[in-house]
Image (tube, rainbow, N blue to C red):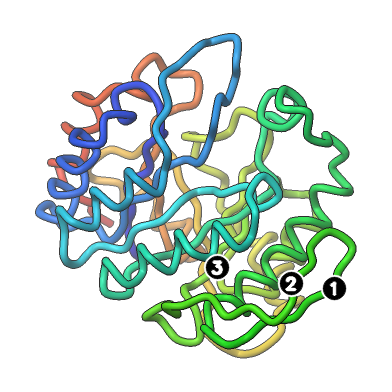
């Protein structure tokens, strides 16, 4: 089991310098990764302050030398794949090959897409996600890409530099379980980041749910490479009774999160206190 810290890209964590301190503290305390959210407004009526996640992760990369860095998750359909490929490759080179790329549909769809005149049709967004992921994997090789798809067109373009990680950074795909389609998508890549119902961010799943999901994903795996099952929640320092059964059920990463409905979800001090305690003891 490996352990990550998960923070939003708004509130106190929209301060790039604060995020760099979080990353340095997480590395010093022995955590394995730091993940940030990728939102532009989240719930727009709340009028929160946001930072670009790739600028936050650049600061984190410059403040650290070991921990993995990435987003949980980037809505690929909200980005131009060529621009996103360049950002990820730049960070992978800067960090010496420490990027993990988390992808998903994103949401809330009405605020993050509809408010900017983008489609809110989830079928179209899923198509863009799948086509975009395929393009990202090709762009990251540094080889010329020609592509004529339903949503994206590319004519003989090579994006350099290629990523340090070969053939590409790990791609983890998020989605709500028990919805099957997102987990079948995840099975084609390198990891699954399930949420177990709306509002479940920060609340640990049951071992039974994790075991069912793990079995489903592995039945649909393509290839025999390493595959991660990433679950998360809020844990005490001694979390053997909480995380141990999840590891036994197939989870390979524990992602430490604040409760979604907590007033502390975007507050620096409580997150830093938890970081300094170190990863859960299991």
Q: Is the Cβ of the residue at disc 3 closer than 8 Å to that at disc 1?
A: no
Q: Residue at x 39, y 38 (%)?
A: 257
Q: Nearer the viewer, residue 252 or 54?
A: 54
Q: Which mark is residue 154?
A: 2
Residue at the spot of label 3: 171
Q: Quadrant of the N terminus?
A: bottom left
Image: 157 above or below 100: below
How far is mark 2 from mark 1, CA to CA?
6 Å
Q: Secondary structure at mark 3?
A: strand
Q: Nearer the viewer, residue 228 or 74?
A: 74
Q: Is the Cβ of the residue at disc 2 closer than 8 Å to that at disc 3?
A: no
Q: Earlier in the sequence, mark 2 or mark 1?
A: 1
Evaluate whether residue 227 shows in this view: yes
Q: Quadrant of the C terminus?
A: bottom left
Q: Residues within 10 Å of mark 1 (few under 14, many from 20)?
A: few
Q: Residues within 10 Å of mark 3 (few under 14, many from 20)?
A: many
The residue mark sitting in front, 2 or 3, is 2
State which quadrant residue 108 falls in: top right
In the image, is 47 to the left or to the right of 99?
right
How far is mark 3 from mark 1, CA to CA?
23 Å
Q: Nearer the viewer, residue 272 or 105?
A: 105
Q: Earlier in the sequence, mark 2 or mark 3?
A: 2
| Percent of width and height locating residue 47 | 50, 11
Q: Which mark is residue 148?
A: 1
Q: Which mark is residue 179?
A: none
Image: 113 above or below 224: above
Evaluate whether residue 209 shows in this view: no
Q: Nearer the viewer, residue 53 or 80?
A: 80
Q: Is the Cβ of the residue at disc 2 closer than 8 Å to that at disc 1?
A: yes
Image: 158 above or below 237: below
């Amino acid at each position: 089991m490996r352990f990550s810290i998960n923070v939003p890209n708004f509130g106190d964590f929209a301060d790039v310098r604060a995020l760099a301190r979080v990353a340095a503290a997480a590395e010093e305390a022995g955590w394995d990764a730091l993940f940030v959210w990728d939102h532009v407004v989240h719930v727009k009526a709340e009028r929160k302050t946001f930072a670009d996640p790739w600028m936050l992760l650049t600061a984190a990369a410059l403040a650290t030398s070991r921990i993995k860095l990435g987003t949980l998750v980037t809505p690929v359909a909200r980005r131009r794949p060529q621009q996103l490929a360049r950002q990820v490759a730049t960070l992978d080179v800067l960090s010496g090959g420490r990027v993990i790329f988390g992808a998903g549909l994103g949401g809330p769809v009405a605020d993050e897409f509809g408010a900017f005149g983008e489609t809110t049709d989830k079928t179209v967004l899923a198509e863009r996600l799948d086509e975009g992921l395929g393009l990202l994997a090709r762009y990251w090789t540094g080889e010329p890409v020609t592509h004529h798809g339903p949503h994206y067109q590319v004519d003989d373009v090579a994006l350099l530099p290629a990523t340090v990680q070969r053939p590409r950074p790990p791609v983890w795909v998020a989605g709500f379980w028990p919805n099957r389609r997102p987990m079948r998508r995840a099975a084609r890549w390198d990891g699954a980041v399930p949420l177990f119902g709306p509002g479940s961010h920060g609340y640990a799943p049951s071992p039974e749910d994790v075991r069912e999901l793990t079995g489903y994903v592995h039945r649909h795996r393509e290839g025999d490479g390493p595959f991660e099952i990433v679950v998360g929640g809020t844990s005490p320092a001694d979390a053997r009774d909480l995380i141990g059964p999840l590891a036994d059920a197939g989870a390979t990463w524990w992602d430490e999160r604040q409760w979604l409905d907590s007033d502390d979800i975007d507050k620096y001090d409580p997150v830093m206190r938890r970081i300094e305690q170190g990863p859960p003891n299991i």
